[in-house]
Amino acid sequence: MTSESVQTIYERLYSQNQFLRERLQKSFVWCGAVFLATNSWFVTNGLTVSREVLYLISAFYLWLALGTIYSIYFHYSEYLANARMIVRIERALGVYEKGRHFPDESLFSQESMAWGTGKYSRHILVGYLILILLLLFLSVAMLFVLNSAPE
């Protein structure tokens, strides 16, 4: 395999990881936007509905949250798989070896090899999951509070 083909693969994987990180963020933003828009509409219109409709709206919120969590987890898994391949290419290129590119040091630190394990990105996944569950809880709670308040 030529160095040009390795470089092409490396660039493609890096580009894919940028895309996957963007998709993680967009999935969360869309979910948050739907929660915010529907909650705002319910509040501004003073929605009062039957228990069955409340359960139906709550089920929709749950479906939205679970779908978003699945999407985020799927994109995160792909992100880690790409990161592991990128680290393999970097190891093959010797960027972690001392003296290979610079006399007394390596191009990348040894700690950078942990990138493919999720060590440096797991907090992003956990943060998104916590925020989605918080949005779900607050949205459902707000619906029930709005509908239990006396008119």
Image (cartoon, grey):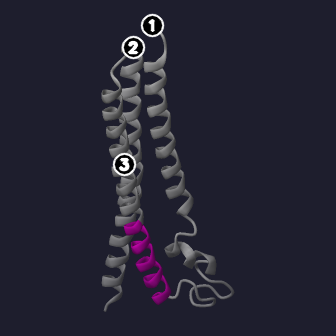
Label whose residue precedes the other's in the sequence (1 or 2) = 2
Q: Mark 3 points at which residue?
A: 27
Q: Position of residue 78 (x, y in %)?
A: 37, 68
Disc nearest the viewer among 1 and 2: 1
112 lies above or below 126? below
Label whose residue precedes the other's in the sequence (2 or 3) = 3
What residue is shown at x 41% (from left), y 57% (from top)? 21
Q: Position of residue 80 (x, y in %)?
A: 44, 70
What number is the disc on residue 46?
Answer: 2
Label whose residue precedes the other's in the sequence (3 or 1) = 3
Q: How far apart are marks 1 and 2 (CA)?
A: 10 Å
- Residue at the farthest right position: 104
33 lies above or below 3? above
Q: Distance between the residues labelled 3 and 1?
A: 37 Å
Local packing at callout 3 (Cα closer than 10 Å; few below 14, some 14-19, many 20+) is some
- Image quarter where the C terminus lies is top left
Local packing at callout 2 (Cα closer than 10 Å; few below 14, some 14-19, many 20+) is few
Asked if the residues shown at circle 2 and circle 3 are in contact, with their CB atoms under 8 angstroms apart, the answer is: no
Q: Name the residue under label 1.
A: 151
Helix, strand, or loop for circle 2? loop
Helix, strand, or loop for circle 1? loop
Q: How far apart are marks 2 and 3 (CA)?
A: 29 Å
Find out whether residue 79 is within the magenta segment: yes
Q: Nearer the viewer, residue 85 or 136?
A: 136
Q: Nearer the viewer, residue 4 or 93?
A: 93
Q: What stretch is highlighted in magenta?
A: 77-93
**What residue type is disc 3 on?**
Ser
What residue is shown at x 57% (from left), y 86% (from top)? 101
